[in-house]
Amino acid sequence: MAKTLTLNNADIMGPAVPFPEYHEPFDLFGPTLEFPQYHEPLDVMTSLSPSPANGAPVNKLVEQVIRTPGRRPSPQPTHFSVPYKNGNGNGHRVLRSATVGYIAPEFKGKNEQIVHVKENILAGGWIPASLVDDQITWFYDDLGIDDVYFQTESVDAIVSNITSLYAAKVAAFAREDKKHEVRLDMEATDHAIYIDTSEPGITRMGGPRYEHRLETKYLDSGSSNTYRVETFRSSSNLANGGPSKSTMRCYFVYQCQFVDPNPSPLETRMEVIGDQTFLAKATKNTMQIYQEIIEVAVKRTGPVIEVFDIEGSKEMRIVIAFRRRTASGMFSALSDLYHSYGVTSTRKYVEQFSNGITVICLYLKPATNLDSNLTFPPLSQSIHQITKEISLLYCIPQNKFQALFASGRLCLQETIYGHCLWVFVHHFLNRLGSEYSSLVSALDPANSLHAEILSNIKRRLRTETFTADYIAEIINGQPELVRSLYASFADTHLAFGPGYEDDFVPSNPSAAVLTDDELKDLISKTVNNEHEEMVMSAFLIFNKALLKTNFYTPTKIALSFRLNPSFLPSLEYPQPLYGMFLVISSESRGFHLRFRDISRGGIRIVKSRNREAYSINARSMFDENYGLANTQQRKNKDIPEGGSKGVILLDPGHQDKAAVAFEKYIDSIMDLLLPPASPGIKNPIVDLYGKEEILFMGPDENTAELVDWATGHARKRGAPWWKSFFTGKSPKLGGIPHDTYGMTTLSVREYVTGIYRKLGLDPSTIRKMQTGGPDGDLGSNEILRSNEKYTSIVDGSGVLVDPNGLDHPELIRLAKKRVMISEFDITKLSPDGYRILVDESNVKLPNGEVVTNGTVFRNTFHLRETGLTDIFVPCGGRPESIDLSSVHKLIKKGKSIIPYIVEGANLFITQDAKLRLEHAGCILYKDASANKGGVTSSSLEVLASLSFDDKGFEENMCVGSDGEAPEFYKAYVKGVQEIIQLNARLEFEAIWREHKETKVRRSTLSDTLSIAITKLDEELQKTDLWEDEKLKRSVLQDALPKLLQDKIGLDLIIERVPNNYLRAIFGSYLASRFVYEFGSKPSQFAFFDFMSKRMATIQK
C-alpha cells in the first residue's frame, strides 16, 4: 500500500547549516514516558495575521494570549444525560486509575522487527552507528507508542520514521533561535501517524494543523471507511527540561475493522458494534462506560456527555457520544474549548462503532505551563463549564469567528452569536438602494404582473457590495462590539426558571448590558465607516426582533430563532409575514416562513452543484422561500391553513448530509414549539411571543423520504400534535400519499377536462405535450388518468416524440413502474418518432435536423414550434422555464402556437409570460389554481389527525404491517378525492365565468379570486359570526367531511380540534363558497344575500 512520508522542517530551519555528525550529549527526551502524563497539543485555527517573514513557526505564545479582564464562564446550563447505573447520579463517577483506558495486545514479533529495523538503519547510514540503538530504544519505548502501531507498520516505514525524527532533532538543535520543533506525518489509506511539538494548553495559530488534517482526511472525510484515533503527549521536551516548553505529541489513526459492519442502528452490544482493535485494547471499565453512554446516544439526536474523576490522579475524564458525521470539526474544536479554560489533555481517543455512534474520550488536567498572570477556575469548575458548552459547540463546531475564540478575544458564546448574526446580516442587509424604491412607486404592487416584475428586478438589483466574506471581515474587526451586543442578547434570553439549580447559574455576561440607545451610540462611535455601521446595526435589529431561541437550552443539535418579521421592509416584502424561524447548524441554514397563524406548506432542501451555485442559492434563498410561501398562500384558498414554506440550504461541504440537516432543522424548531418537560434536558426558555404555536409541514424537494422520521420524532418528544405535524407521511403512520392516490393530478385533470367540456372537444383527438415524465408523481398520474394523444414528453433523461402518437400502453407501463422515458421501448415508435437523451450529441432527427447537444435540446424543447401540440401540461421542470424573454418563441403572427395550457408544475411560467400567451389567444390556467389538489388532501389529512385520539387514529387511519388499509381509511381517501375534484371544479367555473363576463385574463383572475377569498376569510374570522353557535355548527357540518362526522361526532371533533383551527375552517369555507358564487368583486348586497340564504336554511 502506498505511503507518503513528509519531513516538514523547511519552516523550522534557520540559515543553512552543515548536516553534522551528531553525537547526543545527553538524553534528548529524558526518562521513559508515563502514558497518563500527557499534555494535550493543539493546532486548530490559522491565525488571521500573516506568518513572519523569516518563516519561523507562529505560535500563540503565552504572553501574546489576549484574555479580556472580567471574562466570565459560559452561561450554558449543564446537563449530564446518561442515566447512571452506578454512582450517585450527580454527573460524576470516580474511577480507579488501574481500570482506566486501554491495554494494547502484545506484539509477539516486536523483538524480531527491531532487529530488522536496526539492520536497515545501519545500511542506510543516515544515523551514526553509535546512536542507532538509542534512537530505536527511544522510538520503541519512550514515545509511548503501543504495539498496535508496530504490528501495523512495515519495517521500511518504521525505519523511515525513526530516521526522519532523528534528522528533525538535528535540524531543531541547529536552529539559530534554538526552538526545538519536530514535525512528522505519514498518511496511508488505512492508517496515519502525525508527530509534532507544541506547548501544552496553548492553541497554535500556525504550524501543520494536524488535528484539522486528520479530521478532513479521515474522521470527517465522507468516505465509506471509518477511522479511530489515539493521541498522547510526552512529559518532557527536546531540551530535557531546558527552556523550551514544547513537548512531543503523537496522533495515530487506524481504519476500523468492525465485528459486524452493518448492525441495526439501535444495536448497542459492544461485542457486535465494536472495532476489533478497540475490543482487544479497552479495559473492562472502559467497555462498560462506552456501553452505557452508547445505549443513551442511540436514542438521542444530539450529544450525550459523561464526566469521571480518576482516583489518585489530578485528571478528569470526559466522554462524549454522538451520531457520526453530525458534527464535522468537533474533535479539533474541543481542544479550543478546554484550552479557553486553562485545561490541557493527557490523552484523547476517538472511537467509532458500526451502529453509527462516535465516542470521543478526553483525559483533562490543568495546564501548568501557562503565564502566571492568567487565572482560571479550579479544574472541577472548568470541567463543569466545558460540559455546559459542548452542546453549543456541537451545533456549530467550527464557527466563522473561531480564531477570535482560539485567541481568547471572545468566548465561545460570543463567537457563535457572531456567526449566527453573520448569517442573518447576509440575508437581510438592505442592498437594493433607492432605485428599487423608485420602481415601486412607479409600479402597482397589487397588480400581479407588476408584482412579478418587481420580484425579478429585486433579484437582479441585489449587488455584491455586502458579500458574505465582506460581512465576516467587518464583524471580525469589531470583537468589542460583538461582546456588547451579545451581552444585550444574553440579558434578554438567558433566564432561569423551574428546573435550574443554583449552582448551575453562571456569572453575568462579560460586558456591561447597555440600552438600545447606548448600543447605537457605541456603534456609531466605534465603527470606521458607513458599511461597518450598517452591519453592526443589523445586530440590534436582530436582538429586537428575536422572540425566543434555544441558544441556552441545555441539549440541542442546532440553533433556532423565532423572529418577529416586522423588520422586513414593506417595499421589498409587501405581503406581511406572520411568523419566521431561522435555523443554523454546522451543515446548513434554513428558514420557515408563514403568512398566517394556522398555515401549512412543504419543507425543501436545496443542494448546490458547486460553490458558485451555493453563493447564488444563499443570496436568493430567503426571497425564494418568501415567494413559495406566498404562492402557497394563494393556493390554499379552499382550506383553513394559510401558506407557509421551509427551505434548508446545505453548506458547500455538506451536500451529502440532507438527512442530518433536516433532522437538526426539525428538532431545533420543536425546541421552540414544545414546553420544557425534562429539567436539565429541555429547560424553560424566555418566550416573548407568549402564545402556543403549531406548525403544519409537508414534503417537498429532497424531503419526501424524511417525513416519517419527523412524525416519529414529534411523537417521541411528546408533541400532542405529532399526528398532524407532517403530511405526506407513509400510510402506516396515517398519511395519505399524494402520488399513490393522484391527489394533485385530480385537480389538474379537472381543469384539463373542464376546457374540453366547455369547448366540446374530443380528448382522444387532442395532441398533448408534457414536461415531467412517467417517473414523477404528477407526471406519472397524469399519464395514468389521461386519454389524450401524447405526441411529446420531456423529462430528466431527455425528449420522446412521435407525431403519430406515443404508444399509450408503453407509457402506462413506464408510469406504473415510475421510470424515465430513457426506458421507453423505442421499437414502439413510428418511423417519424424519436428519442433524444441528454447525454447524446450529433443525432439526426427523422426530418433531417441534427441535434448537437441532447441536454440543450431537452431544456428548450417546450419552446420549439413543432406543430404537434394542442394542449401543454407542465408536470415538472424548473421554475421560469417560460419567461418574458422566451415566450415569443411560442407566439407566431400574434397567435399562440399552443391553444391550451394547464400549469401543473409550480412557477413553470412567469406571470408576464402567462399574460402574453393569453393575449395571443391561449386558454391558460395557472399553477395556483390547477395543482391545489395536493394541499387539499394534506389539509384533510391534518383534520383527521386532529379529530381522532391516538387510539382511534391508529385503528382507523394507519395501514397495518400487512399492508391492509382500514375500511375507514379507504372510504376517507375516496371522500378526499371527491372534495378535491369539487373544489377544483368550483374554481374552474368561477374563473371561466368571470373571464367571459369581464375579459380579464384567467391568470389575473386566479390571483384576484385567491386574494378575495383570503381577505374575506381573515375578516370573517374577526367578526362575531363565529360566536353564533347555530351558524358555527351549520358551517362546520358543511365544511367537515361527512364520513369524519359520522365516525367521531361533530361535538367531539369540536372538542378535540384547536379552536383557532376550527375558526380557520369556518372562515375559509364561507369565504371560498361566497367568492366562487359571486365573484371577486361582488355587489355590496351580495354577502348579505349569501348569508341570508344560509341563515334561512338554519332556521328550518
Image (cartoon, grey):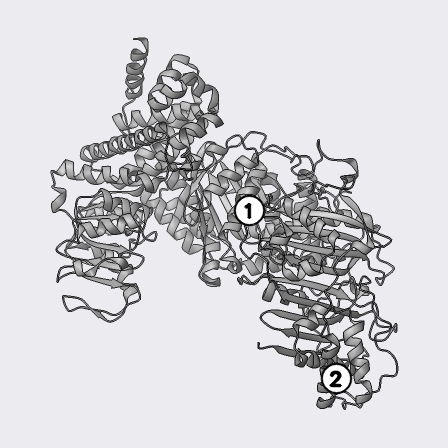
**Residue, disc 2:** 118
| Residue 118 horizontal side relative to residue 304, left or right | right
> Mark 2, residues whose alpha carbon is within 10 Å: few (<14), some, or many (≥20)?
some
Report x, y in % for residue 104: 73, 64
**Residue, disc 1:** 664
Q: Is residue 967 above or below residue 349?
A: above
Question: Count of labels shown?
Answer: 2
| Residue 573 horizontal side relative to residue 667, left or right | left
Which residue in the rendered view is the most extreme toward the front? 108
* Residue at the (80%, 82%) spot, across then down: 133
**Quadrant assignment, res 22:** bottom right
* Residue at the (26%, 47%) spot, across then down: 914
Amino acid at circle 2:
Lys
* Residue at the (29%, 50%) spot, across then down: 817
Residue 692: numbered disc? none
**Quadrant assignment, res 364:** bottom right
Report x, y in % for residue 59: 75, 69
Report x, y in % for residue 698: 43, 40
Report x, y in % for residue 515: 69, 40
Of the 4 image quadrants, the one containing the N terminus is bottom right
